[in-house]
Image (cartoon, helix red, strand yellow):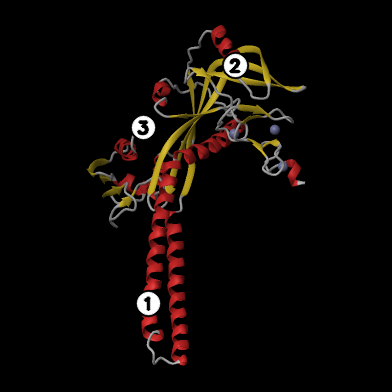
Amino acid sequence: MNRSLPDVLADILTFKGALLERIEDGYLEFIVPPSLSKTLGVPEHGKLSFVYPPFDESVISASYESDFFRSIDRLFPGKGKIAKAVYSSHLPNIEKVSRWVSEKIAFSNASFRLQKVDNQRIAYALIFFKYVALSDEKREGVFFLLVNEENFSTFPLNANLTAFWEDLKEPEEIYTKGERISKALRAGFSAASLIVKEEFEPFIKSLERRLNRDIIRVFEYYETLKSEIHKTFEKKFFSEKESSEEQSEEGRKVLSGRLDVVEGEKRWKIQDLVSKYALNIRIEPICIIDIETESLVFWLEVRRRLSSRIFPLSYNPFLKKVDSLPCENCFHPRGTYYLCDEKLHILCATCFKKCPGCGREYCSVCYPKGCPRCKK
Ligand SMILES: [Zn+2]
Ligand SMILES: [Zn+2]
Ligand SMILES: [Zn+2]
């Protein structure tokens, strides 16, 4: 599944009757039939470029955010962005997994009891996201997330995808449950943003390093320039014995004017560097496969103080392990799990925030706008 964009596009175009040849790294030469040329809005013969920015005006950019990439959609008219699939699962021993759930699932501030285990139909949304990160260079790619449509537990999939990809089958009957999918998409999108942010952390660090290095260079260059100007003026206006008071005054004015110009240019150059190294990341869902399967659902009765809540945790038949608990705020849990006091939302350590103002912990789902105490 982890194939490059040129390979995937080449497959699609070949399937539609095109002839393609890789001429060098990052370029594909094509000949397409007239009908395909019309549908895609490209000449019958040309070159596709996967290089950013494309150096040659005569080539057609085919990167993820190009018009060409979007035009590929037209090759699949009537086919939506959501596909349905079924997966036949192989379920494990119920006792063994139940024991695992009772022993390994844990909350930092709550307890739970395994109420019952059901064998039932459940659904997962497999969501494909593309990302484009632009700064002084461009990075882009595609990644996949598996989202449980019942409890919105999310999993990034890498090589794992190949393990079950081939076992997906077309369903016999199709019924829609749009609301579930859109909730899964929202959860997936939240998780995807955090995953991409984490992924780019080393890159952001390197951008900051390069920015600092360049700013120091610019700063030193202009400071040296300023001291040179100073020296020249010293010699010309202030050191000669015969220079009059008037001449010195005139000199000071010219000098301060020159220095202001240099200072202005320095600031402008630094601002320029800041925008050059600024990172702009965009994430977009490309398509969703709604996969139905049968699995074990562990109904947990979660208790916090005097309240309780029933929460379904599933055995994930694709990954062959129990789903992790979700974080009902960010959907990309980091650290241990907590329950909120009011509605018993499940939160990760990052989302069960301590208010910097009053030190009290609060739930980011119940209070998305911040600490309820300090707001008032
Ligand atoms: Zn969280
Ligand atoms: Zn507070
Ligand atoms: Zn809450």
Report the front residue among 361 and 293. 361
Residue assigned mark 3: 2
Residue assigned mark 1: 231
Does 317 sit above or below residue 27? above
Q: Residue at x 37, y 71 (%)?
A: 225
Residue 337 image label? none
How far apart in space, not on screen, are marks 2 and 1 (Cα)?
Answer: 80 Å
Task: Count neighbours of disc 3 (C-alpha within 10 A) and say few if under 14, some if 14 to 19, many if 20 or more.
Answer: few
How far apart in space, not on screen, are marks 2 and 3 (Cα)?
Answer: 31 Å
Q: Is residue 341 left or right of residue 158?
A: right
Q: Residue at x 38, y 68 (%)?
A: 224
Q: Earlier in the sequence, mark 1 or mark 3?
A: 3
Asked if the residue at label 1 sits under 8 Å from ligand 2, the reply is no
Q: Quadrant of ligand 2?
A: top right
Q: Earlier in the sequence, mark 2 or mark 3?
A: 3
Residue type at mark 1: give it: Lys
Q: Are marks 2 and 1 in contact (CB under 8 Å)?
A: no
Residue type at mark 2: give it: Val
Q: Earlier in the sequence, mark 2 or mark 1?
A: 1
Task: Count neighbours of disc 2 (C-alpha within 10 A) and say few if under 14, some if 14 to 19, many if 20 or more.
Answer: many
Residue assigned mark 2: 297
Residue 353 picture location, percent across and down? 65, 37
Does 294 sit above or below residue 273? above
Q: Residue at x 77, y 46 (%)?
A: 376
> Can residue 50 be seen from the camera position used here?
yes
Residue type at mark 3: give it: Asn
Report the front residue among 240 and 258. 240
Looking at the rendered structure, the secondary structure element under dot 1 is helix
Residue 257 picture location, percent across and down? 46, 80
Q: Are marks 1 and 3 in contact (CB under 8 Å)?
A: no
How far apart in space, not on screen, are marks 1 and 3 (Cα)?
Answer: 62 Å
